[in-house]
């Protein structure tokens, strides 16, 4: 895993346009709670010193940030952070003193009213995984909602990529993440200008996409950027399925826009209202025979279904920071983002949150099946939303379960997201399709045959996934122990580090397919028997001796099956080898 520095975190907020200060050595008074003395008398309140690492602000919002890269699970450090934030939020005189100290140290005028600003505490540890982060979040009370946030490695890396790529325009996603309302970051004039914007003349199809009202209209890129969001697979949002933003793609579209001055692309940008938006907020009126629509001004009001790169290309007006020759081009792009118009199609889905999300996912899949090929990993995430009972959806969930299982043998072994911390892990596409899908199928005779319960709807899936994941975790623990004992070396990591192929895609899929035979032989609970059978495998997993390519998992399964069958005649079912 890459080693990150506090400067990487500071850069996130600076790129987004926040004023940010490194205040690690800027101490401030924190008043301790009253404590009982040994004699039972209350001690006087004592002023002690406390510190934070970063201070950032935008509009009338302050972020007080603590950065740590400590790998141990330190609840005390997090609890101390909570105490500092609670104190600074409740004691505005103390907050005013901190702001004054900061102004004095950096010789700047911040001009914030300590009595009126919104305070947010952010605790960042880029070594934390999701499970560790959720454990600490469980220590927060309902009173901490919208006050204290925590970033693990995934969230930190996600915002680092997004803020580095689209710079100042990433602030709108940060505002959404921290539940910031527009009135806290825009002044009155700016707010009135956006909320009082002229309605957009539209072409309406009453029964358009999937039978829902569909509008096509023109809007400036800037106005759309302030209102839109993308459900990226890597993002902090749950139920996300789209691609990560690609810098080179933005650069190519930027070049086209500047060269042609053409902002009306052949394909419309397609958006849909967020499930959080009441359809009635999109007001339609007819005036002089023309249909006009009014769009609400709220961050993340509309989900971009198709065209994120076409829209985000208008954010690339910072190239002159690195090449002065790009200065005029940056000016042209800034002007086009503000003054030009792009063609947008709005599909007004209705229903509850899950229904709207499912329709958005289906539309995204339909569009991308005929355009840019969608990575298989994204298809699985889409499948979870569209068809949660599909075997590949359950297999994908099981992979995520194994990847996140605390103290699990496959914890952090799969490439679930395309973030830096996931590089070098096991690709999940083959694992899901060829290894797990048949095992977890609820219409099959493998896991479901020993589950003894029914899986009728999506509410039943988490329990079934846990059942499958726990069985597989036991099985792979046995594999790890058997081959560690055989080779007497570290074998349970990427082959580039260990020179062993046990965690290659072909090995994992081969072992998963072999597990079908263990189920048929009723060997899923007794670890000693599982290991006894595994010891009969003669395959050499040393990198220089391993002969199976990434797609030869079937040959590997067959070899291991006959190794075991030769010693234990009751093992498995040879008819499965053909499937």
Image (cartoon, helix red, strand yellow):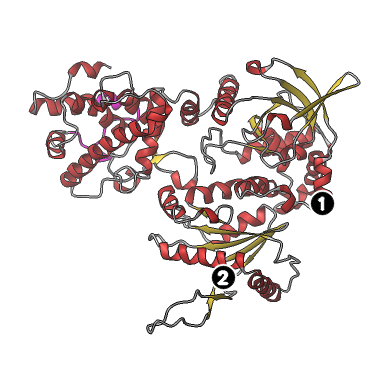
- Nearest to the observer: residue 486 or residue 222: 222
Q: Is residue 401 visible?
A: yes
Q: Which residues are magenta?
A: 539-556
Q: Residues within 10 Å of mark 1 (few under 14, many from 20)?
A: few
Name the residue located 45 percent from the left edge and 48 percent from the top edge. 421
Q: Is residue 109 left or right of residue 92?
A: right
Q: Which residue is the site of mark 2?
A: 24
Q: How many marks?
A: 2
Residue 64 is situated, as x and y percent measured from the top left of the image, at 60, 63
Q: Residues within 10 Å of mark 2 (few under 14, many from 20)?
A: some
Residue 573 is situated, as x and y percent measured from the top left of the image, at 17, 19
Q: Is residue 200 left or right of residue 253?
A: right
Q: Is residue 66 magenta?
A: no
Residue 529 is situated, as x and y percent measured from the top left of the image, at 12, 36
Residue 4 is situated, as x and y percent measured from the top left of the image, at 50, 58
Query: Do the residues bearing badges 2 and 1 touch, measured as CB atoms within 8 Å?
Result: no
Name the residue located 74 percent from the left edge and 46 percent from the top edge. 317
In this rendering, the label closer to the viewer, 2 or 1: 1
- Nearest to the observer: residue 376 or residue 256: 376
Vertical relation: 25 (above or below) 410? below
* Mark positioned earlier in the residue sequence (2 or 1): 2
Considering the whole magenta stretch, tell me its main secondary structure. Answer: loop
Vertical relation: 45 (above or below) 444? below
Q: Determine whether the residue tagged by mark 1 lies in a helix, strand or loop.
A: helix
Name the residue located 62 percent from the left edge and 39 percent from the top edge. 248
Q: Residue furthest front?
A: 40
Q: Is residue 149 visible?
A: no
Name the residue located 8 percent from the left edge and 23 percent from the top edge. 569
> Disc 2 versus disc 1: distance between alpha carbons?
34 Å
Q: Which residue is the site of mark 1?
A: 188
Q: Quadrant of residue 473?
A: top left
Q: Is residue 542 magenta?
A: yes
């Amino acid at each position: 895993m890459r080693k990150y520095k506090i400067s990487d975190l500071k850069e996130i907020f600076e790129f987004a346009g926040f004023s940010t200060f490194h205040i690690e050595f800027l101490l401030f008074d924190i008043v301790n709670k009253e404590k009982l003395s040994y004699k039972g008398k209350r001690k006087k309140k004592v002023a002690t010193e406390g510190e934070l690492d970063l201070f950032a602000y935008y509009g009338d919002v302050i972020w007080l940030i603590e950065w740590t890269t400590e790998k141990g699970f330190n609840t005390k450090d997090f609890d101390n952070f909570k105490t500092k934030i609670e104190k600074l939020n409740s004691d505005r005189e103390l907050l005013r003193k901190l702001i004054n100290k900061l102004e004095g140290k950096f010789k700047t005028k911040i001009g914030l009213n300590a009595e009126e600003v919104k305070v947010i505490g952010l605790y960042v540890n880029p070594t934390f995984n999701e499970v560790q982060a959720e454990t600490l979040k469980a220590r927060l009370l309902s009173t901490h909602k919208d006050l204290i946030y925590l970033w693990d490695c995934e969230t930190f890396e996600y915002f680092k990529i997004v803020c580095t790529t689209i710079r100042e325009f990433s602030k709108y996603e940060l505002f959404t993440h921290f539940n910031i309302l527009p009135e806290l970051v825009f002044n009155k004039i700016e707010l009135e200008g956006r909320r009082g914007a002229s309605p957009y003349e539209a072409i309406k199809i009453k029964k358009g996409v999937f039978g829902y009202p569909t509008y096509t209209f023109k809007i400036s890129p800037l106005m759309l950027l302030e209102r839109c969001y993308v459900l990226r697979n890597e993002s902090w949002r749950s139920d996300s399925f789209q691609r990560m933003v690609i810098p080179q793609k933005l650069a190519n579209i930027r070049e086209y826009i500047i060269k042609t001055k053409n902002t009306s692309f052949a394909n419309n940008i397609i958006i849909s209202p967020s499930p959080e938006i009441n359809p009635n907020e999109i007001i339609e009126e007819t005036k002089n025979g023309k249909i006009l629509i009014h769009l609400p001004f709220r961050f993340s009001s509309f989900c971009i279904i198709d065209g994120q790169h076409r829209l985000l290309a208008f954010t690339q007006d910072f190239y002159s920071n690195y090449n002065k020759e790009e200065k005029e081009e940056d000016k042209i792009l800034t002007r086009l983002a503000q003054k030009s118009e792009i063609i947008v199609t709005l599909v007004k889905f209705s229903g509850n949150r899950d229904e709207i999300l499912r329709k958005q996912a289906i539309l995204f899949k339909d569009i991308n099946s005929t355009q840019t090929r969608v990575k298989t990993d994204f298809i699985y995430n889409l499948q979870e939303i569209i068809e949660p009972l599909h075997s590949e959806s359950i297999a994908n969930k099981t992979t995520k379960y194994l990847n996140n299982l605390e103290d699990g043998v496959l914890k952090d072994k799969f490439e679930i997201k395309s973030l830096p911390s996931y590089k070098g892990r096991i690709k999940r596409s083959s694992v899901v399709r060829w290894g797990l899908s048949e095992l977890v199928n609820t219409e099959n005779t493998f896991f479901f045959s020993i589950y003894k319960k029914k899986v009728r709807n999506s509410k039943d899936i988490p329990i079934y996934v846990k059942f499958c994941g726990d069985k597989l975790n036991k099985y792979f623990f046995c594999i790890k122990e058997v081959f560690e004992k055989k080779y007497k070396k570290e074998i349970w990591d990427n082959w580039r580090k260990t020179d062993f192929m046990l965690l290659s895609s072909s090995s994992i899929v081969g072992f998963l397919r072999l597990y079908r035979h263990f189920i048929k032989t009723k060997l899923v609970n007794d670890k000693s028997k599982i290991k006894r059978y595994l010891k009969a495998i003669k395959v050499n997993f040393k990198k220089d001796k391993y002969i199976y390519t990434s797609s030869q998992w079937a040959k590997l399964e067959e070899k291991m099956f006959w190794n075991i069958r030769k010693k234990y005649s009751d093992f498995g079912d040879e008819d499965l080898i053909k499937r």
